[in-house]
Image: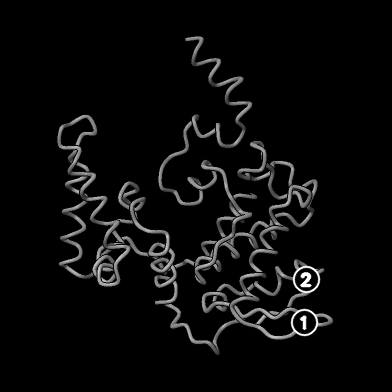
């Protein structure tokens, strides 16, 4: 249930926004050609340079103003090709995902949802304030309340994302836990006992992830484990090796032990 709510929170913002199809025939042809070339190359084959050349080509496009316009044509198909996506610049990925969301919402400044929060009670009532997903797809404006607080803008929204993510990721809050010294976090199986309203907060966390992508912001405190990222993205099946990111000690003590004993 915890994972489902986290995923639902993200999906409510992305519903109908992302597509794996390409309407432009030229873009579809180019993307199919690149993917076909890359898939036809065996890593052990002497033609390995072909795959590297394609990845470098995509990387160069993502770092060029004119190249980005061309890459926009066939990016919807390339998003399912991890090796080529890895070559794209982070800046381009953030811009592209944001544009896919905003393309369906026709974002206008006056259409964004205005929310008011207090720094000392940031999460109080936040689940209700961000309840309607159709309003969230337009983005949000954030204003802090309290003595000495004034103004609003991108800086306030960026700070809101950072503070909210930090509180939700805090092990003491109970939603997530870390087994690798704080490098990454995973869903806490005991979250229901430590946070009675844990499902609503997992959905809130998912919505914040979606909003951060929409506004091209980062959430450094929500560093999910590789296994959790795979589940959220649905890009590839989870394997027993992914346990290493969830619980390194358990993986080394049990999984590796059993593998070496064969």
**Secondary structure of residue under mark 1:** loop
Left or right relative to 244: residue 25: left
In this rendering, would 3 be left or right of 174? left
In front here: 176 or 90?
Answer: 90
Spot occupied by residue 214 in the image (x, y as percentages of width and height): 50, 70
Quick check: 155 above or below 197? below
Tell me the distance, in whole angstroms, between the alpha carbons under discs 1 and 2: 10 Å
Please give the name of the residue rendered at 40% of the width and 73% of the height, measured from the top-left corner.
99
Query: Which residue is denoted by mark 2 in the rendering?
Result: 119
Residue indicated by mark 1: 149
Residue 92, percent across and down?
A: 38, 64
Residue at 79 percent across and 53 percent down: it is 196
Front-most of residues 63 and 123: 63
Q: Which mark is residue 91?
A: none
Q: Say whether marks 1 and 2 touch (CB < 8 Å).
A: yes
The picture places residue 121, in percent across and down from the top left corner, at: 81, 69
Above or below for 250 versus 153: above
């Amino acid at each position: 249930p915890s994972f489902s709510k986290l995923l639902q929170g993200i999906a409510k913002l992305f519903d109908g926004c992302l597509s794996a199809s390409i309407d432009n025939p030229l873009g579809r042809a180019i993307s199919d050609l690149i993917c076909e070339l890359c898939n036809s190359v065996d890593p052990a084959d002497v033609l390995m340079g072909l795959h590297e050349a394609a990845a470098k080509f995509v990387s160069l496009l993502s770092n060029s103003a004119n190249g980005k316009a061309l890459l926009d044509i066939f990016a919807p198909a390339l998003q399912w090709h991890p090796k080529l996506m890895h070559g794209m610049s982070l800046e381009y990925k953030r811009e592209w995902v944001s544009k896919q969301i905003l393309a369906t919402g026709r974002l206008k400044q006056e259409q964004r949802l205005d929310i008011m929060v207090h720094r000392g009670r940031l999460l109080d009532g936040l689940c209700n304030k961000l309840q309607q997903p159709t309003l969230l797809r337009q983005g949000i404006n954030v204003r802090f309340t309290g003595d000495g607080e004034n103004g609003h803008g991108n800086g306030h929204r960026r700070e809101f994302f950072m503070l909210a993510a930090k509180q939700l990721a805090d092990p003491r809050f109970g939603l997530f836990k870390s087994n690798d010294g704080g490098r990454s976090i995973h869903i806490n199986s005991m979250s229901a006992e430590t946070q009675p309203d844990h499902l609503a907060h997992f959905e809130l966390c998912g919505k914040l992830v979606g909003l951060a992508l929409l506004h091209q912001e980062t959430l450094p405190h929500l560093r999910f484990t590789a296994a959790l990222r795979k589940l959220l993205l649905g890009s590839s099946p989870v394997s027993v090796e992914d346990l290493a990111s969830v619980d390194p000690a358990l993986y080394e003590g049990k999984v590796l032990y059993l593998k070496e004993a064969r």
